[in-house]
Amino acid sequence: MKVVEVVKSYADSIGGSFSAYDDSKAAVIIPIGKHRHQTVLAETKSINGSFYIALTSKISNKEAIKDADIYEKQKNLLFGKLVIEKEHLEIKAYLEEKMSPALIAEVFNEIAAFADIYEKRFTGKDIY
């Protein structure tokens, strides 16, 4: 599974834009509603000898978390999980090679939508 091909295909399908950093890392800017966008970083990872694409989208710095029940809300996610990484609250998910393009799109959509909702709630801005 080539990360740049996956991200480019998804970006083209939604009218988003993408940037490839190298063969193992790319980002897509996903339009969400009027005047809002969410960036999702896609990066090749090896976990126990298997290769995956890790998707990450920042929500806010951890000091901006205003709603402790956000961790309860993540129970409604099918693909994503919340993590604190380098002082930021982020949502992460993984793509496998056997996933269909439609399922890959669902994962990207879930990550971006959840991140954007809580980024707006916590920061009042469109930062990431």
Image (cartoon, rainbow, N blue to C red):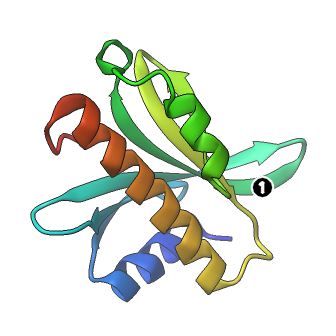
Residue at image position (33%, 48%) is 117
In the image, 76 versus 97, the foreground residue is 76
Q: Is residue 89 rendered to the left or right of residue 98?
A: left
Query: x, y (%) of residue 66?
Result: 33, 21
Q: Residue at 47% of width from left, 21% of height from top?
A: 68
Q: Nearer the viewer, residue 93 or 115?
A: 115
Question: Is 7 located above or below residue 65 in the figure?
Answer: below
| Residue carrying label 1 | 51
Q: Which image quarter holds the C terminus?
A: top left
Question: Which x, y percent locates residue 70?
Answer: 49, 32
Q: How many marks?
A: 1
**Residue 43 visible in this rendered orientation of the protein:** yes
Residue most extreme to the left = 35
Task: Establish if 97 lies above or below 63.
Answer: below
- In percent of width and height, residue 14 lies at 34, 82
In the picture, residue 15 is in which quadrant?
A: bottom left
Q: Residue furthest right?
A: 48
Label 1: element kind: strand
Image quadrant occupied by the N terminus = bottom right
Q: What's under tag 1, amino acid-wise? A: Phe
x then y, percent, for residue 121: 26, 37
The structure residue drawn at horizontal position 32% and vertical position 53%, both measured from the top left corner, is: 39
Report the front residue among 4 and 123. Answer: 123
Quadrant of the image occupied by residue 20? bottom left
Q: Residues within 10 Å of mark 1 (few under 14, many from 20)?
A: some
Task: Kindly indicate the quadrant of the structure image that contains residue 2.
Answer: bottom right
The reply to whether residue 26 is visible in this rendering is no
